[in-house]
């Protein structure tokens, strides 16, 4: 593929946690910042120890800000744990690890929200402090908690994901009704030339974004090119519970099943060379490439491949 | 004075911050724990960074738990400041210093309050973790914010005390109406043989406790002996703004003025040798002794003196 000029295209990326943060970082390396918007899942957000915690927003923010812990997929590099050790000594809830430095993000966010700021404004404030230039937006300014229905009952997302280490089998992901997009999200999607769905968990990272009214309808109706990148490679999730959830929900654990899950919503689908030949006959256009992102260089390369593919699709529509 | 046996007397101490914590610690050294209740001012409490912070309760708790920072009068020994440094880097409010270890107290308290526990139950839980045996009680389970009226307007207590470093001259201390005592506080006062008013600021530490209905009425009406210890020595406050406030409120900055402020509420008044001879003619019985508490041994000695004096008064009534 030829290298194309991205400077005149407005790009929106829908992102969840680690996979979303990595593709967002790749895009940020090659797209002019004024043309790039990352819309982030907030279905994982929760209140804990009095604080409003937004795990996916923080993973994206720390990754783009160059302060993410490279080993964990969450939290900050160079973290310490004095507060959590003291919480444990006080017999407080210590199942959700909050580092001493990471805590500052939640404290400042909570204070600003209590002062009446929107989550959009708070996120932009925090991103400025990390010198992040692309616009990072929460999918909504209002709580939109994802629930996980299991055999043992319905759990708030973090109770299932962290406290129960995503072990209780998933019967169904339950998304809230009547969640509204923000003016900033609507504007970004209206102006977008290309919409990318990051290699995030389709059910608990991407679906909550699509569930925010009217994001799904906008992607279906308006003429932008929508391209998704698979989070499943060779029958495995790169990270997290996507593969386990698919098996529990009686879906084949394949990139093809992800593409079918997105269905008519997407114009193009990017999958890994390990799955070459397994996606024949789908209606979406396909790009087979190396989708693993082991390093920042990998992120930029995948972003380059995905954008080039998406622009070619946009040009041919 | 002879040493007396305290084991059969129920003792209640009304306490604010540092002075209250030190006398409480002295009492805890010599009184059987089941006979000692500390009722603590919560008028200084505030919400900050999403957390419920109770400075006087924490000072008493950290002092009795042996983990107080001996240099500051607030916070914990061996503290670190990574979270606050990060809050500052995120352009968050950093005027109220919260150490990494201290933060755990506020996080656990806030979570338990959100879970529906009373501040009394939360405080008892925290005290158990610090192996504190006397009963430490908030004066009320409901918010009772003290306001400071200054020339520049009316400020919440911590905004005046910490953010403005108690510099704006005080016109008046404004206490809330209709604050109720808890069942635990009522029971402790009903059962008390001796009530001690610690050498805390009369206006912003003790008055908020007396303002909680029906604490003042109980002290006036029921037959326990009430003894106050002066926070003013030789025309100076041992710590904090008491002397400055007295001058600004056109009161003489003397131990005598403190005794007169408490008036008929007290049966006895303990003042320092530096002020010998200056309290003649007052109706309350008087004990002149060394009231400075430089060390834990000083605290126990003053507690011994005050209790002996109070028991002699109780015996003579």
Image (cartoon, coloured by chain):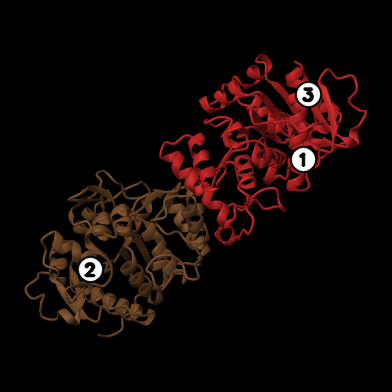
Chain colours: A brown, B red
A40 or A274: nearer the eye? A274
Taking A55 as reference, is A241 left or right? left
Q: Is residue A295 above or below residue A170?
A: below
Depth check, mark 3 against mark 2: the one in front is: 3
According to the image, label 3 marks what residue?
B268
Q: Chain of mark 2?
A: A
Q: Determine whether the residue tagged by mark 3 lies in a helix, strand or loop.
A: strand
Crowd around label 1: few <14 · some 14–19 · many ≥20 (10 Å): many
Crowd around label 2: few <14 · some 14–19 · many ≥20 (10 Å): many
Asked if badges 3 and 2 are on one and the same chain, I answer no
Taking B2 as reference, is B145 left or right? left
The residue that appears at 40% across and 76% down in the rendered structure is: A29
- Whether residue B294 is visible, yes or no, is yes
Depth check, mark 3 against mark 1: the one in front is: 1
B268 or A153: nearer the eye? B268
Q: Determine whether the residue tagged by mark 2 lies in a helix, strand or loop.
A: strand
According to the image, label 1 marks what residue?
B301
Q: Chain of mark 3?
A: B
Q: Are marks 3 and 1 in contact (CB under 8 Å)?
A: no
Query: Which disc number belongs to residue A228?
Result: 2
Q: CA distance from mark 1 to mark 2?
A: 75 Å
């Amino acid at each position: 593929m030829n290298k194309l000029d991205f400077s005149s295209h407005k790009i929106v990326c829908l992102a969840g946690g680690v996979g979303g943060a990595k593709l967002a970082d790749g895009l940020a390396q090659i797209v002019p910042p004024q043309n790039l918007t990352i819309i982030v899942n907030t279905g994982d957000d929760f209140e804990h120890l009095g604080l409003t915690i937004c795990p996916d927003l923080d993973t994206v923010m720390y990754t783009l800000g160059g302060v993410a812990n490279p080993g964990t997929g969450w939290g900050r590099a160079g973290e310490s744990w004095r507060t959590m050790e003291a919480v444990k000594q006080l017999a407080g809830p210590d199942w959700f690890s909050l580092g001493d430095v990471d805590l500052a993000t939640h404290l400042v966010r909570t204070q600003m929200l209590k002062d009446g700021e929107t989550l959009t404004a708070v996120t932009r404030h925090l991103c400025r402090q990390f010198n992040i230039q692309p616009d990072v937006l929460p999918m909504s300014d209002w709580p939109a908690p994802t629930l996980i229905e299991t055999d043992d009952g319905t759990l708030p997302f973090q109770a299932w994901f962290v406290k129960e280490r995503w072990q209780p089998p998933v019967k169904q992901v339950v998304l809230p009704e009547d969640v509204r997009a923000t003016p900033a999200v609507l504007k970004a999607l209206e102006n977008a030339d290309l919409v990318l769905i990051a290699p995030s968990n389709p059910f608990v990272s991407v679906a909550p974004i699509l569930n925010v009214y009217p994001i799904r309808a906008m992607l279906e109706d308006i003429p932008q090119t929508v391209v998704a990148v698979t989070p499943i490679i060779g029958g495995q999730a790169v990270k997290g519970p996507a593969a386990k959830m698919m098996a529990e929900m009686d879906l084949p654990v394949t990139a093809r099943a992800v593409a079918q899950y997105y269905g008519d919503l997407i114009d193009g689908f990017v999958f890994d060379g390990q799955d070459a030949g397994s996606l024949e006959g789908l209606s979406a256009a396909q790009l087979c490439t190396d989708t693993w992102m082991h390093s920042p260089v990998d992120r930029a390369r995948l972003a380059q491949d995905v954008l080039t593919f998406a622009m070619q699709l946009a040009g041919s529509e």
